[in-house]
Amino acid sequence: MSTPFDHKLAELHRAKQVAPPTALGDGIYAIGVPLAGSPLRSITVYALRTSAGLVLIDAAYEHPTCWSSLTSSLAAIGHRITDVVAVLLTHNHPDHLGLAEQIREASGATLTIHRRDDFGWQRQERGGFLDQLRTVLGQTGVPDETGAEMFEAATKVAVHRESMTADRILVDAITELTFGDVTLRAIHAPGHTYGHTVYQHPAGFVFTGDTLMPEGSTQLALAPLRHDDPVGDLLGSFATIGGLGATVACPAHQYPFLDVEERCHELAALHTAEQARARALATTHLDAWGVAPQLSWAKPWHEMGISTRRFALVHTHALLQPLP
């Protein structure tokens, strides 16, 4: 477990409460947005003040309660949605980009995402998100009825709209993005998704999306293709983030924390050991459905709900990739 940057934010997370808008310094605000119907409970959208206007990191679910919460929180820090000039997306999951187009319509903000998480590119490379999920569930060995229940639950948690088109597509390992007096670095950091991107602020903050959090492990990307290697991708991303020299990590869930490099080393060791354990179990269990209940999770397998089991199952499937 890492050292919190702001102990109050850590306490609120552990109390399962959504934090109010919180100034982190250097014109950066953490804005907790509740996620209706999700076991994640909330996401943190980061608002960055620049001389060109307000820059947001991620955009929450496409849901009226998220929109109301975000706009109210921006008002609480003295801003309106029309002040937003850019939305920088860490990745293409619905809790991160759901409101992006609505924000653009309201403010004229530009939307930025990495090419491998751009929906058009993703469809060409590996199919849409729900197509990938259906394929992966079919590869895990899960019984048909349970797999169908897992898939249906995934479609009910959030709107999986894949029509969004970004204004800027990132293609390089590192890209500089300048907004008035602030220049951020967009750094490709795959593992949670194939186009996952973290953003580094010159004041020492790195916005890590879902790649690096202070507690627990990192959820691996869906791995429907034979050559997919989410663990290898993630270990490379930990090495990259750990070498940035950042002093504060700002994840999309939980709370900002210190000891960034140490946390990268800790998670790299955790996932390396986790993969070794899964592969050892796979010698006596035929597939991910047989391996998953044998692994260690935050909650015992028999106590998990259908959505939590789905997350654990597709994570286990990813641990067993790439196929020989």
Image (tube, rainbow, N blue to C red):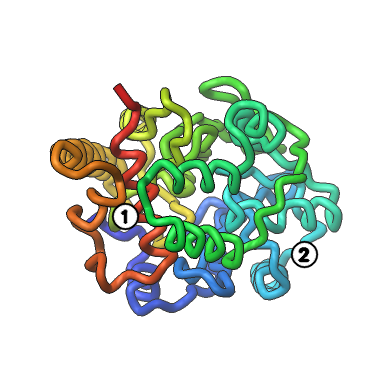
x and y percent of residue 274 in the render?
20, 43
Q: Is residue 17 visible?
A: yes
Image: 66 above or below 165: below
Picture quadrant where residue 186 is located: top right
x and y percent of residue 239 in the render?
31, 29
Instruction: Answer with left or right where residue 204 lies relative to residue 166.
Output: left
CA separation, marks 1 and 2? 31 Å
Image: 308 above or below 214: below
**Which residue is found at the position 22% from the left and 38% from the top?**
275
Quarter of the rendering occupied by the N terminus? bottom left
Picture quadrant where residue 117 is located: top right
Towards the viewer: 45 or 246: 45
Instruction: Answer with left or right where residue 263 lies relative to residue 205.
Output: left
Q: Dot 2 lies on which element? A: loop
Which of the two labelled residues, at mark 1 and mark 2, occupies the earlier sequence position? Answer: 2
Few, some or many residues within 10 Å of mark 2 (<14, 14–19, 20+): some
x and y percent of residue 187 in the render?
50, 30
Circles 1 and 2 in contact, beta carbons < 8 Å: no
Picture quadrant where residue 233 is located: top left
The mark lying in front, picked from 1 and 2, is 1
Residue for badge 1? 214
**Which residue is found at the position 57% from the left and 50% from the top?**
93
**Residue at the extreme front:** 144
Quarter of the rendering occupied by the C terminus? top left
**Which residue is found at the position 48% from the left and 55% from the top?**
252
Image: 81 above or below 276: below
Q: Dot 1 lies on which element? A: loop
Question: Mark 1: which amino acid?
Answer: Pro
Towards the viewer: 103 or 96: 96
Few, some or many residues within 10 Å of mark 1 (<14, 14–19, 20+): many
Tag shown at residue 80: 2
